[in-house]
Amino acid sequence: MARIDEVAAAAGVSISTVSYALSGKRAISPDTRRRVLDAAATLGYQPHAGARALAGRRTQIFALTEPLRADTHAPTHMAFVLAASIAARRRDYDLLLLTDEQASAGMQRVAASDLVDAVLVLDVAPDDARVEIARSLRIPTVFIGIPDDHEGLDCVDLDFEGAAALAVDTLADAGVTTMALIGQTDVAYEASNFPPRLRSAALARAEARGSTLRFATSGVTTTDPSSVRAATAAALDAGVTGILIHAAEDAHDAVLSVLAERDLEIGRDISLISVATVFDTSRLSSPVDTIPLVPSASCDVAVELAIARLEEPGRAPVMHLISPDYRSVGSVARPG
Amino acid sequence: MARIDEVAAAAGVSISTVSYALSGKRAISPDTRRRVLDAAATLGYQPHAGARALAGRRTQIFALTEPLRADTHAPTHMAFVLAASIAARRRDYDLLLLTDEQASAGMQRVAASDLVDAVLVLDVAPDDARVEIARSLRIPTVFIGIPDDHEGLDCVDLDFEGAAALAVDTLADAGVTTMALIGQTDVAYEASNFPPRLRSAALARAEARGSTLRFATSGVTTTDPSSVRAATAAALDAGVTGILIHAAEDAHDAVLSVLAERDLEIGRDISLISVATVFDTSRLSSPVDTIPLVPSASCDVAVELAIARLEEPGRAPVMHLISPDYRSVGSVARPG
DNA sequence: TTGAAAGCGGTACCAT
DNA sequence: ATGGTACCGCTTTCAA
């Protein structure tokens, strides 16, 4: 490819002028700038990534670590990876993938070799091994999710506690006194960090509101429609009139099918809210109110936090909780 | 971090000796080598990626392009990304993610800036835009999947035609004369490259064997259990005694449930083969013979092809078709 | 406002 | 078998 000296020659200026004209790091006369830009465009100039990294001490690459556990919900995960990629590109960063065992070992390797400028952590576990590694790195690390021990770390996540409280309040305000929470799979409550956060917040809020909240998981290792159906039926039999779903798409289908079989009209006989879900709920057989988990919201913030820390390493660690957003489509009964 | 000159000083040798001792590119006395390795280990030396890329003209990074279309089956896709990552790491390469619009635009960008040594292409479409881009790049590109126009390209994929023929033959050999193929979603037959390949090969082979083959898709944009159930029922009503499934896991569940409801015993009353599927079929309610699509097989080959072309740019393009592997668990009836 | 040149941290050629 | 050193292509300081 064309090198910077060729661009300089074509524009009739020095190498440093080309560098500055392109980076904007010092004032250049409009006229000179134009000639440089034209020359660069004509020659299809792209700075050599290695040379730039060596001289500039920035690679414009973030590592993205993802352990990919057996219980990882692939569609949700994919949405996060995509969102991270888009957020990074918007700020002129590429993503280097660290999967599997590389999720931990790779962090040290890519940091030590100055391959990346910062690390983004996905699929955070409560006792995540990457916490300790992050603390030992000289480059910024941002957690998308909140580990138990997050002292001194930059973290972003949906405010699951707030989302749970908002959901419970909405049902309670609608007059629901007996409610149910259809949750994630069993393993998710051990391996992942947010399901327990949402559950305990929901339970606490229900109690505070004087309501009863029944909890049921949606399966053992993977969402099991029959167990979701059974849990829904049992809840209805117990007099539940409001259901919170924090689970994958097929669990929603299962709940809706049970309600349909019992001829219960959603938004009148029974209230339904989908909490912290990623998929497109408009595909469901009936509209359902949502407090969505938005990957792009988390990932946009994560990228900004990483960049902020690169620019100001000494700044105080940030725990950024994204406010829950209630999207009503009428699946909650109006009181009276 | 420690630099090469510090390692050299600690080992009492020159910089070039350290470089050679570590790369193995020239003979070093066992004694010297030990001292260098020890010094490097003690100092935790990791070569600076940028410096190495600049001087060595190799980044040890592959780009992985993935368009992520709306119909992308997330679990399968994730399995391929993971397999690619593992295959790359085994050969000391990292993966840079190029998603979405970056899948095409990013290819040129990362190639022009010498950010990566080669490109791996995932989720190949019949008329893939990345074909033309690949031809214009100065770095190797390997397609995991086969575009219509693959002249001069390096490609790897399961031998879908062979897999289809093997499946049809197996049924025909078992005495099945009327068979059905439950295929992918409608859109997959337009946007993706292998569903049509498998379908036409199956149809051709069935005709050659004097058998009848009914074809049905598994849904419009996403697998639709009810449409799969209907297709299965219709096939059975038409006298089908052998079914080929080339679809996602839930389509298998749907087929099996219909068979169960009709009290048909698999492997006796009816024969079943899952063709070119990625998921763990042992989770199904009944064992099903499989001709699996193995991500690691394709990705291992892809990485080797990329490296081979880096080492010998002039070599002839390779179209590597992976032989289908029949895994029998008794779901095909023995003749007689 | 612009240019010259000293690095950045390795690789690999040329010597010895 | 080992060492000295000229690059690799860019960023940034120092000068003018």
Image (spheres, coloured by chain):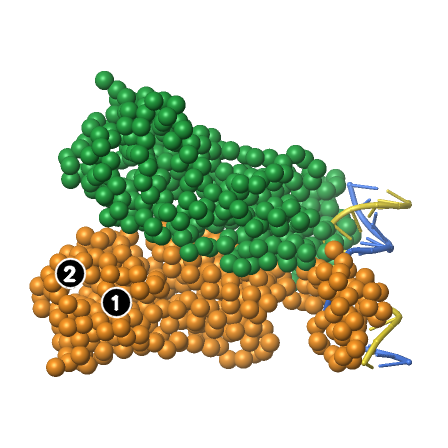
Chain colours: A orange, B green, C yellow, D blue
Q: Give me the C-alpha separation between circle 2 and circle 1.
A: 13 Å
In percent of width and height, residue A89 lies at 56, 65
SS class, disc 1: loop
Q: Which chain carries label 1?
A: A
Decide if residue B261 is on the left or right side of residue B290. Answer: left
The quadrant where residue B234 appears: top left
Which of the two labelled residues, at mark 2 and mark 1, occupies the earlier sequence position?
2
> Which is more toward the observer, B140 or B199?
B199
Q: In this view, does A253 lie above or below B80?
A: below
Which label sits on residue A222? none
Rendered residue at 32%/25% (across/down): B211
SS class, disc 2: helix
Decide if residue A299 is on the left or right side of residue B224. Answer: right
> Which is more toward the observer, C16 or A215?
A215
Residue bearing mark 2: A260
In percent of width and height, residue B12 lies at 76, 53
Q: What residue type is labelled 2?
A: Ala
Q: Mark 2 lies on which chain?
A: A
In percent of width and height, residue B36 lies at 69, 49
Residue bearing mark 1: A287
The answer to whether the residue labelled 2 contacts the one labelled 1, judged by CB atoms less than 8 Å apart, is no
